Amino acid sequence: MARKRQRVSSSGSDSSRVGQITGNGFPANREDCAGDEQQHQEQLQEQGSRDVKVDPDKARIISFGEESSADVVVHLIGDEEENVLHLHSQVLAKSRYFAALLSERWKGDDQASMAAEQEPPKTHLRIDTTSPMPVYLGILRLFYTENFSEAIVDVQSALALLPVAAELLYDDCMARCLKFLEAVPWSREEEQQILQLLNYLQLEETPEIIARVIPGSDSAVETMLSELVYAATHNHQNAASVKLFVGKILDSHKSRETVRLVLDNAFKNGLKTVKDSVEEYSSPNVRGRHDEIEAMQRQNLHTAVVSGRHLLWLVERMIELKVAENAVLEWSEQSSFTANLKRAFMDDVWRNNVPGLPAVLLRCTSRLAQAMVTGSILVSREVRKKMVRDWLPVLITSKENAVSANCNKQLHQNLEEVFLKLISTLPVGDAQELLQQCLSFASRGLDESSNLAMAFATWFRRAGASENS
């Protein structure tokens, strides 16, 4: 807060000229105001014994506004009022501004005339301010009382005192204001006020406050979101409510690219865990007793199904937030993984230990394939072909080895329909290859195979049209 300040004179009891301090756009040549100093003195005395300071040189108590011992007269001029204050240079010296203003080097040519005076000279200073008068008076009283805890009681009081303290270079008061602001919570409106004020004042003593609103790393947001997603997918207590809460945070975050990056990484890590667990189950690379190997296989399947549930949540969030393109690409490049799944689903171990594993992974497939069919995710025909080619055998194996005829029946039917729709988007040659693998869909009978019949009818119509042409 820039002010143009000029100290004009010091004088004895017979003459007084007024030094001027001008700021906030007010001119320096205001007419001197002759306030009723006696009346003001009586008002100041009502402040009581709190506005006092011990004079270390004279071992006596000096008070704010004590005219008899004051050696500085401050004319504090606001928009509509003037206050004449009788103050003490040794107290005002707590302000680096006043200390410089009242130092010997500012007195210049007045030194000789002051030495000739028999009575102690009084320095008259004029301060023009647009700051609220009660705030300015409160700062000047703090020079005497240093009772900062009573003056700074909330964010607004600290914000009111700080600019005046900064203007007067009152370091102790600035430090207490900043310490208070750093330690207490802020409302959103208060945060904006604090940042605007600190930016305006350009103070160097604010790193702890700035740290509350500006992260120390450019990747802080990404790291935070990644940790929240990890907590949501690995929190076994209140998992549903935690996932719901984190999902809302992801949905409301302004940067979709950051959300995409976070969810892509989480998806890749989750998929890797499921793949590794299924691979270790299908091809155990351990030696030991048969029962020990089976125990490890059961543990691998358990890890796969738990991680698969987390993966399904991620897939659903990615589709919901329209950031699932990379997930589709990853899911369509899993020929080795789907081969391991086929082998796993042909065994009896999963039926007794993790009967939900096929459903979890087929739901992931169904969600991604459905997003492709509806056009929410646009991918090349090669990706669409790979999705059906690699995951169709898993669907067929899951149906053939289901725990019961009704186990995941609706899921199987939905995925069959989605696969048939995807096949209809492929060239005739690719569709011919894949449709033949869908004959098992007819196991439900003709009445329940209308979608399959329509898919073949469409193929023959297209192939026939090509043949006729």
Image (cartoon, rainbow, N blue to C red):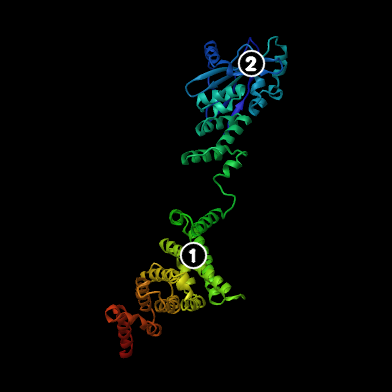
Could you tell me which quadrant the N terminus lies in? top right
Q: Residue at x 54, y 65 (%)?
A: 269
Could you tell me which quadrant the C terminus lies in? bottom left
List x then y, in percent, for residue 11. Answer: 65, 14
List x then y, in percent, for residue 309. Answer: 46, 64
Within 10 Å of disc 1 (Cα), the crowding (few <14, some 14-19, many 20+) is: some
Within 10 Å of disc 2 (Cα), the crowding (few <14, some 14-19, many 20+) is: many
Tell which of 78 and 310 is nearer to you: 310
Indicate the secondary structure of the residue bearing disc 1.
helix
Which label number is shown at residue 241? none
Q: Amino acid at mark 1?
A: Val
Query: In the visual, does 90 lie left or right of 36?
Result: right
Can you tell which of label 2 and label 1 is closer to the viewer? 1
Q: Residue at x 31, y 87 (%)?
A: 465
List x then y, in percent, for residue 43. Answer: 52, 14
Q: Name the residue carrying label 1.
A: 306
Whether residue 251 is visible to the viewer of this picture, yes or no, is: no
Indicate the secondary structure of the residue bearing disc 2.
strand
Position of 242 relative to 154 (above/below):
below
The span from disc 2 to disc 1 (Cα, nearest Å) is 76 Å
Residue 23, by quadrant, is top right
List x then y, in percent, for residue 310. Answer: 47, 63
Q: Name the residue carrying label 2.
A: 62
Tell whether label 1 touches label 2 (CB within 8 Å).
no
Residue 2, by quadrant, is top right
